[in-house]
Image (spheres, grey):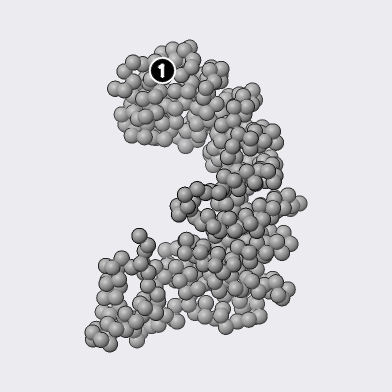
Amino acid sequence: MATRVISQEAFDDLVKENVEDLGMEPSEALEDALYTLKLQGVDLSGIITCVPGESSVKDNPVIACLDRLKELDDEFDEISSLLVKLNELCSGQESGNVAIATKHGAVELTCSICSKIKIDSRSNVIVVPCLKALAVLIHDIQSTEAFRNASGPRIVVDLIRDSGFDSDSLDAGFAVVAAAATGNEVVKEIFMELKVDELILKVLNRESKVTIRALYDAIRVLLTPDDNRVVASQVYGYARTFAKLGIARALTEALQAGIGSDSLVSASIALKSIAVNDEICKSIAESGGIDTLLRCIDDSGEQGNNTAAKTCCSLLSKLAGSDSNKSTIVEKRGLDKLIKLAQRFSDDPLVIQEVMSIISIICLRSPDHAASAIEAGAGDLAIQAMKRFPAAAQMQRNACNMIRNIAVRNAENRKILLASGIEKLIRNAKANNEICRASATDALRDLGLDNYNS
C-alpha cells in the first residue's frame, strides 16, 4: 500500500484551521495537526513545522537557500556559495533537511541550474558544487524519480563528457550517477542508453592516475539489482556489456597498483559486480586478475590490512566459480597463500570466513583440490577457528561448507578430519548457531556419519 503524503500547503492550512475554526492556541494547533496526521499514517518527512505567528516556512534555512537560488541568473559566485551551503545543510540525514529540500523542489531546481552551465563558460565555477549538491539531494526513490523526470541523467552525463576529465568534476558527476541509479531500474536503463558505460571506460583509460572513487561506486550500483519494484532486472546484461566493452580488463589493470593504491578496495568491488558468468571470470584471470589478487593477498597479510584482505578474498571467491580458475589458483599455490593469510589474521573471523569460502569453492566437485587443501592446512584452520570463535555464526557456517566439500569425495580426508575431532565442533556449531544447522548437517553426512540428523 502506498504511503500517504501531504503537501506543505495542506499541512499549513490544517494548522491554520485549528487556530481559526477550533480556537486553539498556535502551539496546540501545531501539535494537534502532527498528532492527527501521524495517527492517520501520513508521512511527514520534509514537512516544516512552524508555530503560527512565531515563524514561517520561509524562515527555514533550506527554503531560504532555495528561494535565493531561484532569484539568481548569472551570479555564478553566489550560486556556487549557495549550492555549497545547500550541500552542507543536507549532508546530515538526521537533520531532516534533505527531505525538506527534495519536498520543496531542490532536485528539479538543481537539475535546471546544471542544464544551463554550458551556456556560459564562466559558469564552470558551479559545476562541482552543483553536482555535489545533487548527489546529496538524491537519497530515496522519490528523489530519483524527480531526477529522472527533470532529465537529470542526460544533463549529468553531458556535464561529465564536457568536464575535460577534471578529477573533481568526474568524481562529483559519477557520485550523482551512483546516487540516482540506486534502487531505480529505470534510471539505470536511461544511463545505459546514454552510453555511460563508454564514458566509464574512457575515464578508466585516461592518462591521469588520480582515483575517481565515485566511478567505482557508479559501476557497482549500475550492476546491482536493487529495485524491488521490478520482477526481472537487466543488470546481468549490463555486466556482460561492461565486460565486452573492456571495463573488466581496465579494472583488472587498475588492481595491479596493489594495496598501495587507494582504489584497490573500490576497484575490486566494482570488478566483482561485473564477474557474473564463467566467461567473464576466465577473461579476468587471463588478464592477470588471479596473479594480481594473490599478490595483493600476500601483501595485505604482511601489512596487516584486513580490509584489503577481505575485499581481495571476496573477489577471488567470485573468480573461483570458474572451474579453470580453480585449477589456476591451486597451481599458483593459492591455497598456501590463503592459509597463510588466515594465520596472519587469526584473530579476525571475517577474514577467516572469506578464506574458507574460497577453499570451499575450489574443492567443490574436485577430490584432487580437496587433497591439496588438506595438505595446505585447511583442516587445521577449520579446527582452530571453530574452537576460537564459537559464536561467529557465518564463519562457523563457512567452516562447515568447507569441511563438506573437502570430505565428500575424498575418503582419506574424511579419516583425517574425523581423527582430528571435527565432529564435535560441527555438532556444537549446529546446536549453537541457527544459520549453521543445514550446513552442519550436510557436513556430518558427507563425513560419513550415520547420525548426521541428530
Q: Residue at the location (70% across, 72% down)? A: 118
Residue 68: x and y in percent read: 54, 81
Q: List the single residue furthest toward the right.
A: 207
Image quarter of the N terminus: bottom left
Image quarter of the C terminus: top left
Secondary structure state at the residue bearing disc 1: loop
Residue 351: x and y in percent read: 50, 35
Q: Compare residues 14 and 357 and report the one nearer the observer.
A: 14
Residue 433: x and y in percent read: 34, 33
**Image: 42 above or below 307:** below
Q: Residue at the location (47% across, 67% down)? A: 98
Q: List the single residue furthest toward the front.
A: 231
* Horizontal arrangement in the rendering, residue 2 relative to residue 259 (left or right): left
Q: Residue at the location (38% across, 17% down)? A: 421
- The answer, for residue 217, to whether it is visible in the render is no
* Horizontal arrangement in the rendering, residue 329 relative to residue 67 (left or right): right
**Image: 47 above or below 407:** below
Residue topped by disc 1: 447
* Horizontal arrangement in the rendering, residue 125 relative to residue 221 (left or right): right
Residue 452: x and y in percent read: 34, 20
Which amino acid is tagged 1?
Leu
* Horizontal arrangement in the rendering, residue 186 relative to residue 288 (left or right): left
Give the crowd class for mark 1: few <14, some 14-19, many >=20 residues within 10 Å. many
Q: Compare residues 148 and 449 and report the one nearer the observer.
A: 148
- The answer, for residue 408, to whether it is visible in the render is yes
Picture mark count:
1
Q: Compare residues 180 and 420 and report the one nearer the observer.
A: 180
Q: Residue at the location (59% across, 27% down)? A: 323
Give the quadrant of residue 322: top right
